[in-house]
Amino acid sequence: MECYIGLDVSQRLTAICVVDAKGKIVVEGKSSTRPNDIHGWLVARDVQISSIVRIGIEAGAMSAWLYIELTKLGLPLICLEAFQAHRFLKTYRNKTDKNDARGLAQLVRIGGEFIRPVIVRARSSQEDRTLLTLRQQLVQQRIGLENNITGSLKPFGLLVPRGNVNSKTFRERVMAALVKANELGLTLSDGIMPSLDLYEDLCKHLAILTRRVEAVSRDNPVCRRLMTAPGVGPIIALSFVTAVDNPLRFSNNEDIGAYFGLTPKQYQSGETDYQGSISRLGNP
């Protein structure tokens, strides 16, 4: 008997629904979110692995890990686009894990060519992507500290220049502003110095991650070629390469623009037909 399975994944538990070829629910329940436990849950309920046509899992934070590990266990997984799955699941009046698992099972059963699967990146691309994400987080924290420190001084007429700044010059400018504060009888140093010390320490760790990104880009021949273009450095090159991952998954070059949301939206209904701004519905 052919069957289709939907997995609604959460951090601790995964809701599972198994339906037959006609859409009738065969068995449903929950398992801990671990590949071996999900596989064991299916085996314990007499679901024949050979009878499984397709297993649907919505793209998310843990989907790549589950996809890779469950595929190793012989399960035919497909990673569903979150936008498409979300629209389909909205047909259920009540939002529950059980209904989401049921909806995903029905989607992979009736979807056919309608389904837009998400290609799971290679582990190496995921690792490089994580490195970029962690570095970007430190960049945002650095900017936040700069804004916080300079914003705290501004109400007292103490302006800290922000142009051409690095950790050393920024500290020197803030210290100069604190000297002026002391001359004015203001006691701001006790509040500013902890943030300034944290800023300097954060910049050191950011420099380490930046050097790591540069080293990874230098070792990648595609990144080296991209960096020959004016204005393209190691961060942009590695971001693009890890996002595209395997270029052979695109049928033609123009699809890459749509993948990054750089193609215009179209609205057509009856006599109305116009194109809007770029969709921005791609990989950010």
Image: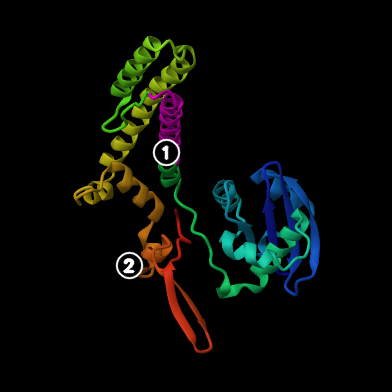
Vertically, is 195 above or below 255? above
Colour convention: rainbow
Mark drawn on residue 154: none
Q: Position of residue 246 (x, y in %)?
A: 38, 57
Q: Quadrant of residue 235?
A: top left
Image side of residue 22 versus residue 174, left or right = right
Compared to residue 266, the image places residue 271 above or below, namely: below
Q: CA distance from mark 2 to mark 1?
A: 28 Å
Residue pictured at 64% horizontal, 46% vertical: 35
Q: Residue 195's x, y, as percent?
A: 46, 20
Position of the N terminus by quadrant: bottom right
Image quadrant assignment for residue 25: bottom right
Q: Which residue shows up at 57% across the image and 52% down it?
A: 67
| Pointers 2 and 1 in contact (C-beta within 8 Å) | no
Task: Give the prevailing secondary structure in the magenta stretch.
Answer: helix
Q: Which residue is mark 2?
A: 253
Closest to the observer, 83 or 130: 83
Q: Position of residue 17 (x, y in %)?
A: 75, 59
Q: Residue furthest bottom?
A: 271
What amino acid is found at the position of numbered circle 2 in the picture?
Asn
- Write down the residue under mark 1: 136
Q: Which residues are magenta?
A: 130-157
Query: What's the amino acid at mark 1?
Result: Gln
Q: Earlier in the sequence, mark 2 or mark 1?
A: 1
State the residue at coordinates (40%, 35%).
Answer: 139
Q: Is residue 107 magenta?
A: no
Q: Nearer the viewer, mark 2 or mark 1?
A: 1
